[in-house]
Amino acid sequence: MKNATETACNRPTRDQSGRYDAMNISMGVMTVLLVVIRLGFKKFFSHQRELGADDWVILATIIIGIPCTIINWVGLTANGLGKDVWTLPVDKLTRFVMYFYVMEVLYLAEMSIIKLSLSLFYLYFFPGKTIRRLLMGTAIFNVLFVFTFVTTGIFQCSPVSRYWTQYVDRNASGYCININSFALIHGAFNIAIDVWMIVLSLSQIQRLELHWKKRVGVTFMFLLGTFVTVVSILRLQSLVNFANSTNPTWDNWIVGWWSTIEVNVGMICTCLPTVRLILVRMAPRIFSTNMSLHQSEWTKEGTGDRYGRSSNVMGHRQVELASIETKVVEEGDMAETEWSFYGARRWSSTSRGSI
């Protein structure tokens, strides 16, 4: 009836599928390319020639992300996403909701795994005991977060098929939790974790003795995460009535739009420090950053390598930070220690003292 009315009134047919596909494919290709560059550089061109735990976690994310890009294209837009529901046959609507359900569960997993990767990266970056405990707690919380929400997402309806049959048969047996509330709660937690991790990283900037220009540069690197938070907020606004829509293929295209951008931007942001490191290798005078740390600042909470082993180093320390690899050179003692935040390799050559 609605389709006949729209046709009789000569109203234009709405279709955002082409725009959605262009965004989905372009961002998917860019994300895969950056992750491959990140992992390839770490494995074959970095000093330690190995992948860290955060790299393996982001690899798991891209393994999920590639099917998501494909499902967005051949599952969602091919079955009506971005179009009015009354222009579609019933079988397409059913397939659309089934694919939307799969994408919802995969989204829940991807976002939590991205945050886990970021917390592991920060864990390698900051050696202080207190910050490491906070970051370890954040990583554990992310693991519990992904388990809880993914499990709830899978079984939000009983039977599971109720999720897609309810759109074509309002009398279908079974029940669902309040899907709208579930999505909003997850979105709110998502944003809260983002803000928490940004605050944790920025709280450590004051420990670095830097020229104000370099301090701004390092701060900017950590503030890149706020862009993901902004996207998360925009996505949260689109969730207000997504599960209660009578025109799901049209109303939910904006939910899919912001969800796809959020996931891809999150993975891209985790790769930017490595991109900067590559640029440092290519043009060190332009992109490198030199900074010195007060020994007293780090020793308040203890210093350590990637696994938290303590270090006793006397004398002046000059730290050269090339995005994520730090080399500490101790003058006068012929002692050198390399901290590789993406690898466990630690070497020293000493004539006296201990490291």
Image (cartoon, rainbow, N blue to C red):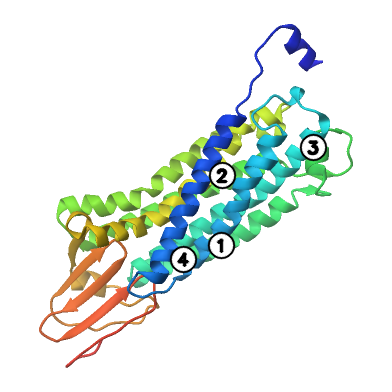
Q: What kind of residue is marked 2? A: Gly
Marks 1 and 3 sit apart, C-alpha to C-alpha, by: 29 Å
* Residue at the image position 85 percent from the left and 32 percent from the top: 170
- Give the Cα distance between marks 2 and 1: 22 Å
Residue closer to the observer: 3 or 153? 3
Residue tagged 2: 187
Q: Earlier in the sequence, mark 1 or mark 3?
A: 1
> How far apart are the alpha carbons under marks 4 and 1?
10 Å
Q: Nearer the viewer, mark 2 or mark 4?
A: 4
**Percent coordinates x, y for residue 73 in the rendering:** 63, 40
Q: Quadrant of residue 228?
A: top left
| Residue furthest out toward the bottom | 351
Q: Could you tell me the amino acid type at mark 4?
A: Asp
Above or below residue 148? Residue 165 is: above
**Residue in view at x 41 percent, y 56 percent:** 271
Q: Nearer the viewer, mark 2 or mark 1?
A: 1
Asked if the residue under mark 3 is in contact with the one under mark 4, i.e. CB atoms within 8 Å, the reply is no
In which quadrant of the rendered image does the C terminus lie? bottom left
* Residue matched to label 3: 94
Q: Residue at x 82, y 46 (%)?
A: 161
332 lies above or below 3: below
Which residue is identified by label 1?
A: 60
Residue 261 in sight in this render: no
CA gap, disc 2 and disc 4: 23 Å
Task: Please provide percent x and percent y for residue 4.
Answer: 79, 13
* First along the sequence among labels 2 and 1: 1
Q: Earlier in the sequence, mark 4 or mark 1?
A: 4
Q: Which mark is residue 54?
A: 4
